[in-house]
Every structure is written in structure tokens, then in C-alpha cells.
Amino acid sequence: MKFLRKIQAKYGVRAAKKQKGTNFHMNWKALRQFGCYVAVKDRALFSCPMLSNGTMASEDVSEVTAPEGPEFLEAVNELFGTRYRMKDFAGR
């Protein structure tokens, strides 16, 4: 339980699960208007659904290959200081 509390405190994640190859070392930030958490690692954008209670669905982390739209990327860019554009993603 100590591990979970440290992760939750350090990264602002209210729910976390200890698992091998965990993604919690990433800086996850909530995008409530899109119902998800996002993180950037090595120029890759990752997403995780937000549950109805506002916590992360930590078992469902995936790399973003087809963003919802330019508004989603604008929000991500504002949070992380990145410059993502729709054409940067293969599934656009």
C-alpha cells in the first residue's frame, strides 16, 4: 500500500495499481473535458480512460495514434508545452 500512496502523491494519481512494467513513472495529467488522463514519454503521447469517480483505468493505457481532434491536441499541448499536430499521428 505504501507504494501506491507514494505514486498517488507524487504524480497526482488518485488510483493506481502495482504491476510489472508500470506506466506510473510518467507524468499523468487529467483532461476532464475529454474523460481521460494523458502523458508524454519520448515524444509519444499516451492516454488512459478516466473512470466515473475521476480515477485512472490504469489497466487500459495506450499510445495515442488517432487523436479525437485538434481540440484534444491543443489541450495536451497546453498541459505539456508540446507542439503536437494532427498530421503527426499515423491514424489521423
Image (cartoon, helix red, strand yellow):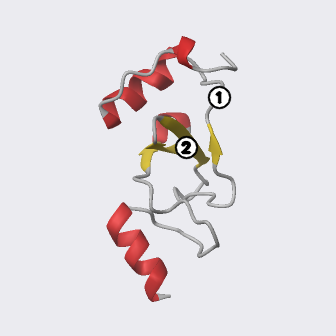
Image location of residue 88, percent across then percent down? 54, 17
Image location of residue 27, percent across then percent down? 39, 53
User: Going 52% across and 37% down the picture, which residue do you hit?
Assistant: 45
Asked whether 74 or 19 is in front, the reply is: 19
Q: Amino acid at mark 1?
A: Thr
As drawn, the label of residue 36 is 2
Q: Amino acid at mark 2?
A: Cys
Q: Secondary structure at mark 2?
A: strand
Figure check: 4 above or below 27? below
Q: Classify mark 1: residues with Cα within 10 Å, few (<14), some (14-19) or many (20+).
A: some
Image location of residue 6, percent across then percent down? 38, 77
Q: Quadrant of residue 53?
A: bottom right
User: Going 60% across and 54% down the picture, which residue do you hit?
Assistant: 52
Q: Secondary structure at mark 1?
A: loop
User: Going 58% across and 50% down the picture, which residue do you hit?
Assistant: 50
Residue 26 as seen in the image, left or right of residue 21: left
Figure check: 4 above or below 28? below
Asked whether 63 or 58 is in front, the reply is: 63
Nearest to N terminus: mark 1 or mark 2: 2
Figure check: 87 above or below 29? above
* Labels in figure, total: 2
Image location of residue 74, percent across then percent down? 40, 21
Residue that extends furthest to the front in the rendered view of this protein: 42
Quadrant housing the C terminus: top right
Residue that extends furthest to the bottom in the rendered view of this protein: 1
Q: Quadrant of residue 19?
A: bottom right
As drawn, the label of residue 65 is 1
User: Going 66% across and 20% down the picture, which residue do you hit?
Assistant: 90
Give the Cα separation between the discs numbered 1 and 2. Answer: 15 Å
